[in-house]
Amino acid sequence: MRAAGSLPLGVMLAVHVVEAAVMARRLARHSVPVGSALWAMWVGSTFLEGAGAFERLNALIEEGEKKEH
């Protein structure tokens, strides 16, 4: 039995899989080697927590860009 208004487990799982796949692509664009420990930590974190991982990555990217200028 699930609470009223909650998503079915399958839908939630699918959303997290898609988020992890999107994160994997973003990491590749930023030269993080696929399969590396860093890559696995980011993708795993994204799978578990979702959007919060994207917020952290965006903040790190912004910080790095500020240091370059």
Image (cartoon, rainbow, N blue to C red):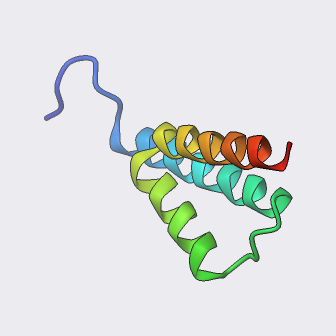
Pick the front one: 41 or 56:
56
Total labels: the figure holds 0
On the rendered image, what quadrant is the N terminus found in? top left
Q: Residue at x 20, y 18 (%)?
A: 4
Where in the figure is residue 67, as x and y percent of width and height? 75, 48
Left or right: 23 as drawn, with respect to 9: right
Is the residue 1 above or below the residue 29 in the image? above
Quarter assignment of residue 25: bottom right
In the displayed structure, would residue 22 be above or below residue 31? above
Q: Is residue 65 left or right of residue 12?
A: right
Give x and y (percent) for residue 40: 56, 73
Residue 54 drawn at (x, y percent): 58, 42
x 75%, y 69%: residue: 32
Q: Which of the two residues, 24 or 55, is positioned nearer the viewer here?
A: 55
Quarter that holds the C terminus: top right
x 51%, y 53%: residue = 46
Query: What residue do we see at 70% from left, 39% from top?
Result: 62
Seen in the picture, residue 3 relative to 39 is either above or below; the reply is above
